[in-house]
Amino acid sequence: MNQGKSLEKRLERKGISRRDFMKYCTILTATMGLPSSFVAKVANAIAAAPRPPVVWLALAECTGCAESLLRTMYPWIDELVLDIISLDYHETIMAPSGAAAEKSLHDTVTKNAGKFILIVDGAVPTAQDGAWGTVGGKTMLQSIKEIAPKALATICVGTCSSYGGLPAAAPNPSGAKSVGEVTGIKTVNIPGCPPNPINLVGTVVNYLLFGKLPDLDEKGRPLFAYGKTIHDQCPRRSHFENGEFVTNFNSEEARKGYCLYQVGCKGPETYNNCPTVKWNDGTSWPVQAGHPCIGCSEPNFWDKFTPFYKSS
Amino acid sequence: MARVVIDPITRIEGHLKIEVEVANGKVTNAWSSSTLFRGIEMMLQGRDPRDAYLFTQRACGVCTYIHGLASIRSVDAAVGVKVPDNARIIRNLLHGAQYLHDHMVHFYHLHALDWVDIVSALKADAKKAADLDASVSPTSPKSGVNDFKAVQARLKKFVESGQLGPFANGYWGHPAYKLPPEVNLIAVSHYLDALRQQARTARMHAIFGGKNPHLQSLVVGGVTCATDLNPSRIAEFKYLWKETMDFVNNVYIPDVLAVAGFYKDWGKIGGNSNFLVYGDFPQTEKEPDSFLFPRGAIFNKKFTAVEPVDLGQIAEHIKHSWYEGDAKGLNPANGETKPSFDKYDTAGRYSWMKSPRYKNEPMEVGPLARVLVAYGKGQPQTRKMVDAVLKKLAIPPEALFSTLGRVAARAIETKIIGESMEAWMNQLVENIKKGDLNICGDWQMPAEGMGAGLNDVPRGALGHWINIKDGKIGNYQMVVPSTWNLGPRDSADKPGPVENALIGTPVADPKRPVEILRTVHSFDPCIACGVHVIDPKTNEVYKFKVV
């Protein structure tokens, strides 16, 4: 509780009122599917010290997952990095490069063996023994095999690290595989292209709160975020039931916000919470912007769900 | 003479390795190597052309949207659809928002730590910092002495925790850092503010694009956001735009000028001579004539003599890249270029990137190229801003050809694009008032077709080319800004722009090469974008119809 109070003080100094702080704890708690009585516990959990060490490895990726994390608002990214976790290695934001960056990785993996949380974005290229993707002269294949077994838990962020994703789309030129496939480790998967940052932050907070990772479905996805289909939560669902469909993006039906199923929406086959949490502080999500869901959090969606605009 | 390898280069998108040769404290030679291959073009063969934008947008999540835009423009051209005015405006607004977001994040979160010593900020006098901030930016928010004290206290607590996270092993205390502690404190404070501002700025994308990163509201012929064409959504967009522009005007631009004032020697380091711009932001349906940033090429720094661009003069070389094929590049022979890694060898093949050349010359693309071409062509906003910046910093125009010039140009164009966006929002409102709600043109998928989407995006000239066969993608190619800037040597062993720019860079301590990062980061490298496999029928591709 003292730690909680000190975090509040720290936040106050930064111009973050208790009300703002409790607001993000409330939103996180709701996203995690916990009863509102947990709000106070969430607030305490994210004030823990020492901050848990986190290593983020970027493999065959586009950095969209890292960018997505930067958009977190509950808490903000500066709070996450300075107050909640210790982000010891993340190539996109870390100060040092080259040998000094390598040292950061080596130091935390050695010092915190068995204690650090590993977050991975990007698939693992396996062609020519992994030579198609290297960092610091080592193949990504080699690095992930070395580092993942030393982590307390491995969280795959995005569809690429979770299931292979884009690099693994046919004909899979680089022999890309998921982290689970190459390491044999049961990973926690936060798929999406990219995933909503609230689902990653919720998973980390779940760990801080309960000392364990959240309950997962058979595809390794946290149930709090991926327990229902887009279709079952879609605000356009009544139009589906009424047989009111968009068939042309420049039509009266499109302006009325009818169902996008006939222009290829993959909502019925896609498990994610986009319709309820939405994106970028609840601003919108693809279906609200009039575009069919492409099923970006499902394994193999680049092949299984294409052509995207064809109704399944 | 010592060889220094920096791998990974951090604070960029993707996987980059830089190797340099250092003699007498200066770089004498450099090699740029990208170390990841995914092969998006190979995946596109035989797929539905409408899907290409969703695949290619995943070339990069930092420059999100722009590969989607380039792709959609190429398919628009191939199917011959007329894009409605509202869709043109919304695409420009999303593109403008991308510039605002991208350049802000680049300056504060990817580049600043090369110039700003965080640890030194602990020694700053908060009162002096507040006075200084008020003098460089009288309207700067959160600039009181208590604000700076709070940042300092937060920083102190963080450092004392012993868990330095991403700031551990930084080059703190390096002699190349020249800012006084107070300027470092201001910059650190704004680094943190910008972390929040960028998340709010990205909301502009969500309004008409559904989400950010990786927007999802483009379609061939237009956009899909039919229900967002209403006053409250446009007002929300305008509010976020205004908030962002306040940050640009009161924080970003003053910070760039303040920091640049201490690093004027970098106006002589890191320059190139040749520049290429495709141009972008069509103000009407007339392209490229109506572009806000005009098309043009500059050779030998002669920015007063901008040449027209002849797309037939673009060629790609692979002598130093990990692909099978003719070492002379430009090979019109049959067959495909196949990725083939053998070994990293700076005398041989050393990168997954190819080397694009224009009239056989390496060309720098990006903010500096755009600003120089616009200046040379007499674009009024650019003239005014560039002249003001040169005057403020008391540096000659030649200083633009440098690492410092690149940083300044990025800030200059952020302001110009941002200010232009207001008129675009107003046009959209006028159209809606008149009852024009069209957002997507009608079209039919042709059995055969070719199209090019030429764009100028935050990192530079970007081209996508599509060839449709039997209604499917027959061939797809991307020639990308970071390939122009960070590609390896060409068939004539001429270094690429970053390799060239690094020569002459001072290196005080080869084990802590922060000066090298300054020039590399000034290009805002985006490596995932830059790595592409391209059919060697290179000559054929550029005969495509150009929009």
Image (spheres, coloured by chain):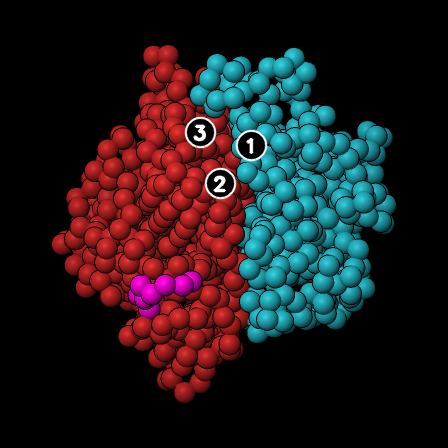
Chain colours: A cyan, B red
- Image height check: is B250 above or below B400? above
Q: What type of secondary structure mainly makes up the magenta span?
A: loop
Residue indicated by mark 3: B223
Residue A289 visible, this angle: yes
**Which residue ends up furthest to the left in the rendered image?**
B305
Q: Could you give the CA–CA distance between mark 1 and mark 2, rounded to whole angstroms?
A: 10 Å
Q: Nearer the viewer, mark 2 or mark 3?
A: 2
Residue B201 in the image: state x and y as whole percent.
49, 37
Tag 2, which chain? B
**Which one is in front in this view, the residue at disc 3 or the one at disc 1?**
1
Foreground of the two, B537 or B236: B537
Where residue B421 sits: x, y (%)?
35, 32
The three-letter code of the residue at mark 3 reads Val
Vertical order, A102 against B201 (above or below): below
Task: Tell me which residue sits at (34%, 59%) in the image.
Answer: B537
Q: Check contact, mark 1 vs mark 2: CB within 8 A.
A: yes
Image quadrant for the N terminus of chain B? Answer: bottom left
The kind of residue on which mark 2 rests is Asp
Q: Amino acid at mark 1?
A: Lys
Q: Secondary structure at mark 3?
A: strand
Magenta run includes residue B145: no
Q: Is residue B206 left or right of residue A221?
A: left
Residue identified by numbered label 2: B48
Which residue corresponds to mark 1? A310
Which contiguous range is marked in magenta? B329-336
Specify few, some or many for label 2: CA neighbours under 10 Å numbering under 14, 14-19, or 20 or more.
some
Residue name at image x 49 percent, y 40 percent: B48
